[in-house]
Image (cartoon, helix red, strand yellow):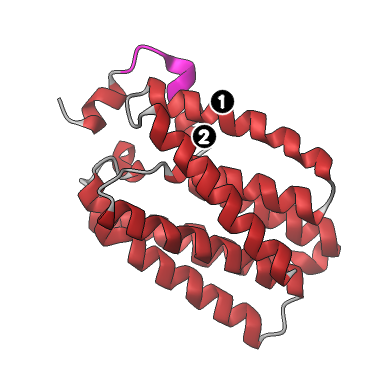
Amino acid sequence: MNSATAAQASPNPLARRMSDWIDPKNVITAVSLLIGCGLYGWRGLGWAAVAIVFAAVLPMAYILYVAGDGTWANRHLTERQQRITVLPVISTSVAAGLALQTVTGAPGPMIAMTAAMWATITAIWPVTVLARYKISVHTAVTGGSVAMLALAFSPGWSIGFALVAGLGWARVSVHEHTVSQVVTGAVLGTAVAGTVYALMA
């Protein structure tokens, strides 16, 4: 049984739902809207939309069209080899969104947010390739997003790390990752995104 089949066969429906709902594209969409509209009101919606398109919509379209097996369930890229091919494309897409924000005069915190997303995805790739380690993108993206929200608004947003822990439990429960992989993803995402956002915002 491959990992995709094992995940679908998970006996825990809550873990499956958490894994599906709190996935990178949804988290990226949420954090982009929260930072964009939270800091700049309706004016921030456009800058958030750029991040969402280049960091969530286009990467997901590529995954479904090129890298997937034709099923919606495989959008999580359950095989490490798929990630080796897809992550550079996602990194390039996010970089294009970052460039567009920069040349069109996006506010510093919005540029910092997208740069942090790019740095996180880019950091995951060598771990996946060189260490031959299927680090959790789910917990990396979610951990980094919580770190950025805490920096953008208040330390109180750090309560979101409870969600990261719950998501890690879900990813292990559906047999997509080991405990080590979800913890490593959370630590990497939090450190990379938090550092980049703090330095650039």
**Among the 4 quarters of the image, the one containing residue 16:** top left
Secondary structure of the residue carrying numbered label 2: helix
The residue sitting at the left extreme is 1
Q: Residue at x 23, y 31 (%)?
A: 3
Dominant secondary structure, magenta: helix
Return the residue nearer the eye: 4 or 164: 164
Q: Residues within 10 Å of mark 1 (few under 14, many from 20)?
A: some
Q: Which residue is label 2 attached to?
A: 21
Q: Amino acid at mark 1?
A: Gly
In the rendered view, tell whether residue 11 sits above or below residue 103: above
Q: Residue at x 51, y 49 (%)?
A: 188
Q: CA distance from mark 1 to mark 2?
A: 12 Å
Q: Amino acid at mark 2?
A: Trp
Q: Which residues are magenta?
A: 10-17
Expressed as whole percent of the image width and height from the top left, the position of residue 75 reads 34, 44
Q: Is residue 89 magenta?
A: no
* Circle nearer the viewer, 1 or 2: 1
The residue sitting at the bottom extreme is 103
Return the residue nearer the eye: 131 or 85: 131
Expressed as whole percent of the image width and height from the top left, the position of residue 195 reads 65, 60
Q: Residue at x 35, y 67 (%)?
A: 89
The residue sitting at the top extreme is 11
First of labels 1, 2 by sequence position: 2
Return the residue nearer the eye: 48 or 162: 162
